Each structure stands twice: as C-alpha cells, then as structure tokens.
Image: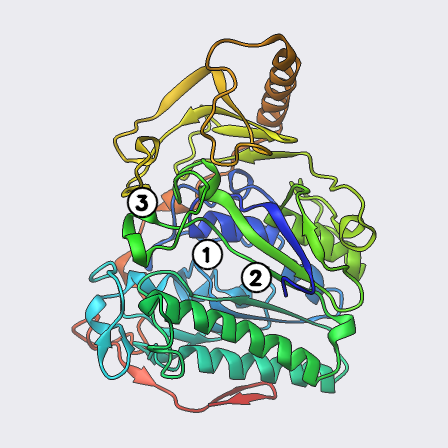
Amino acid sequence: MAAGGLRFRDFYSTGTACSPSRASLLTGRYQSRNGIYPDVFLPDSRGGLPLSEVTIAEILQSHGYRTAMVGKWHLGLGLNGTYLPTRQGFQHFLGLPFSHDQGPCQNLTCFPPNISCYGTCDLGEALVPLFLDEKIIQEPLDFTNLVLKYQRFSKSFISASVNDKKPFFLYYASHHTHYPQFASAQYTGQSLRGQFGDALLELDGSVYELLNTIWENGIQNNTLVIFTSDNGPETMRMERGGCSGLLKCGTNTTYECGVREPAIMFWEGKIQPGVTSELASTLDILPTVASITGASLPKTTLDGYDLSKLLFNGHPSPRNTFHYYPGSIDPKKGIFAVRLGKYKAHFYTQGAATSETTPDPDCHETSFLTFHDPPLLFDLSTDPAENYNLLKGGIPGDLGTVLNEILAEHNRFQKTVKYAESEINKGTDPSLKPCCNPECSPKPDCCRCEKRRSSVKGLTWS
C-alpha cells in the first residue's frame, strides 16, 4: 500500500485513547462535540456514541451502500445493544464491543498451545464476547482463530456485494497491536520482534488478505482503501507497547506521538503513489468519502475537510490547522495545543502514566498539568520531536506574527465549540456487562457459549 498509494507524514487522530478517536473518525467531529470524553468506555458503561450522531456508515447506507464493521468497536454497548454498530449505520457487525484488554487475563489464551497473551489486562471486567450483529456467538472468544474469522467474514461480505453489484463500505478495526498481543498459529513465533512482532505480522497479513480479495473480485480500480490508526503507543509497556520513534511521548499526551498516526490512502489507477507532508486527519475521512461517492453530508457542524483534490490532483490540503485535546477534557481549559501550518503551540502540557519509561521527563506521570504563557512553540517541519521551544528566550520579532495568528486561531476555535454532555461520565451499571447466558450464575464465569458456524443474510463462514 505504501509503495502504491499516498503516504501521509502529518496525519492526526483527534484522541489520545481509543473511544474518542474512533468516534471522531466515524463522525468527522471532535470528541468535544459528540460527547465521547474523557477516557474510554468500560464493558458496563451506560453511555455510548449518541444515536443522533451521523456516521460514515449511515451516510453511505442511505446512498445505497452495503455496510459492515469488523473488529473493535469501543463506542458503547448499552442496554439491549443500544449503541452497537448495527444501530449506527452498519448492517453487519462481527467483533468486540469493547477493548480486548478489558477482560480477565486468565480467559485470554492467545498463543498456542495454551500460552497466555503477551501482556497484562484489566482483571474482572467481563469475559470477552464475540458479537455477530447483536448476538454473542462466542464467550470468551478464542484469540487463536479470531483474525481468521474476521478475514472469512470480510471476504464473504466483499464477494457477496460484488456478486450482487452493490457498492460496499467495510470498516475493519483490527485489535493489533493493542496489548495483550496475540496471533494465530500461522504467525506465532515467526517474528524476530517476539510476540509483539507476531501480532504486527498478522496485522500486515490481514491487510494483504483484504487487498487480495479486492483484486480477486476485479474491483481494484473502483475501491478506495484507507489505512491508519487511532492513537499513539503506550510506551509504559516498553517492548509490548510499540515504539514512539523520534516523536515525543505517547498515548494520553498531546505531544506528537499521542496523536500523529501512520496513514496510507490507496486506489489503483486513481491515486498517484508518493509521500506527502500535507496536513490531514481522521476527521477528513467522512467528508472525503461523501465527496467521492456523492453521498449527502450530515446537517451538523463538521471538523473535517474534503481531501479529494489532494488525493487525485495533488492540490494542497484544505486543512492548515489541527487542535489537540487531552484525554480528560475540561471545557474550561479546552484544547491543549494548536497546529497552524508547520508551527505547533502548547498552551497546556501534561505527562501520563501510559507514557512512562521514556527518558524524557516531560512524558512522565510526574510531569503535572502546566499552563504556558506564552505558549511553547515548535517548528514541526524541522523539529518533529518537539525539543526546541522557539520562544524559550522571549518572542523574536519574526515569530510575533506567527504567535498572533496561532492565538487568533485558538480563540476562534474555542468559540465554535459547544461541549456535548459527556457520554463516558454517565457512569456504569454492572448488569450491562455482556453475557450470552444472561440468567446464569455466578457471573462472569457462567457466561460461556460458542456457535461454530454463523451466517447472516447471505454471508456464511465458520
């Protein structure tokens, strides 16, 4: 994909953790507008992505597209599946309603034969269930063949859509390389990077399988494929948490490695291969897809831009700004940083436990919330690691104009945001933890089931 598509150097997710960033990707709106803050949903969370929000799946389904989601949802479950993907525009769903680390470790058998997953997880939340649409078909799920199920489902969905001459939208949200790492037998022990590398190999293999299915069905000249991620690595987990490279800190911070992501957009014969430093974000996916397909945009405030002219004609990106929210949003403080062109200004900085173990003290949990006036200013074109504050010795005359423009953008954006009620702060209810045998006892150990062969509306796999 990278060799044959357009690779982005400056591509951003809106959130420093899973739930906020996924909500923004699907809606084209910052999490402050859709209420998916602070932090992430738990298995027994009362809230979820509001049904009033319009997702990419909804605009495409209304435009005649078949829609399906595979993998990690993490945007709420709710009573009787209120917030599942099937209530948000996806006709089919095969996957997990929350993160796979939110289940008891003793039930995560990932590397055969019977070796525990590589890493730690949150004990005692709920047995990890595999959903098909709105029904649990396996609990706890078997990680040794999970990706194989995803691949078979995805291939069946794509092939059925092509055979029926229907356009389709597939949102494949891989669990790799989120901890605890796992891989199927085909990839276990195959990487010099250890079990983290095995998981990364399986991610690469799953992308290959999807691309190969597109070629097998002869639709490579009529299919846009987008590859990106939701947030930066948890450096506290060291070799189990990924690598931040030259970027600063990691997840749960508003430094670059918290939200700058890899991204590739690939369309055989339509997008010229190359590398771009034009600014772009997951926010831009919805308006770009709407423009390409002719689907109608939601009648609400969007924070994304149409990138189609950048993709197809090499024009500059319409995006020249990006706004950085922390994990724990406080409407009184608002955004922590602003990027304007090549410059980035930090108004607040704060370290995080999830960005520990790096040698940079700015990343650590002991780096407490700090307000900066004047802000910290970095030139990301020459200093992507955010090492050299351009305003450390005062405000040089040639940067005064830049600073004034950033301050104006900061104030402009703050005035546009009407903070939605927090969905995550709606609290929890233990009865919402998913169980395939809801009347059984004692929970969660009695929540066990498996359906070996599954089918929905013409899609069949095992």
Name the side, left or right, on which 93 lies relative to 371.
right
Q: Nearer the viewer, mark 3 or mark 1?
A: 3
Whichever of labels 3 and 1 marks the residue nearer the N terminus, that label is: 1
Q: Which residue matches tag 1?
A: 75
**Is 62 drawn above or below residue 327 in the view shown?**
below
Callout 2 secondary element? loop
> Residue at position x 57%, y 75% from top?
208
- Residue 70 visible, this orientation: yes
Q: Position of residue 312 (x, y in %)?
A: 80, 55
Picture quarter with the N terminus? bottom right
Marks 1 & 2, CB-CB < 8 Å contact: yes
**Is 79 drawn above or below residue 208 in the view shown?**
above
Whichever of labels 2 and 3 marks the residue nearer the N terminus, that label is: 2
* C-alpha gap between disc 1 and disc 2: 10 Å
Q: Position of residue 362 (x, y in %)?
A: 34, 31
| Amino acid type for the residue under numbered disc 3 | Thr
Q: Nearer the viewer, mark 1 or mark 2?
A: 1
Name the side, left or right, on which 461 lies relative to 198.
right
**Is 355 drawn above or below residue 160 in the view shown?**
above
- Residue 15 visible, this orientation: no
Name the side, left or right, on which 198 lies relative to 385.
left
| Amino acid type for the residue under numbered disc 1 | Leu
Marks 2 & 3, CB-CB < 8 Å contact: no
Callout 1 secondary element? loop
Q: Which residue matches tag 3?
A: 354
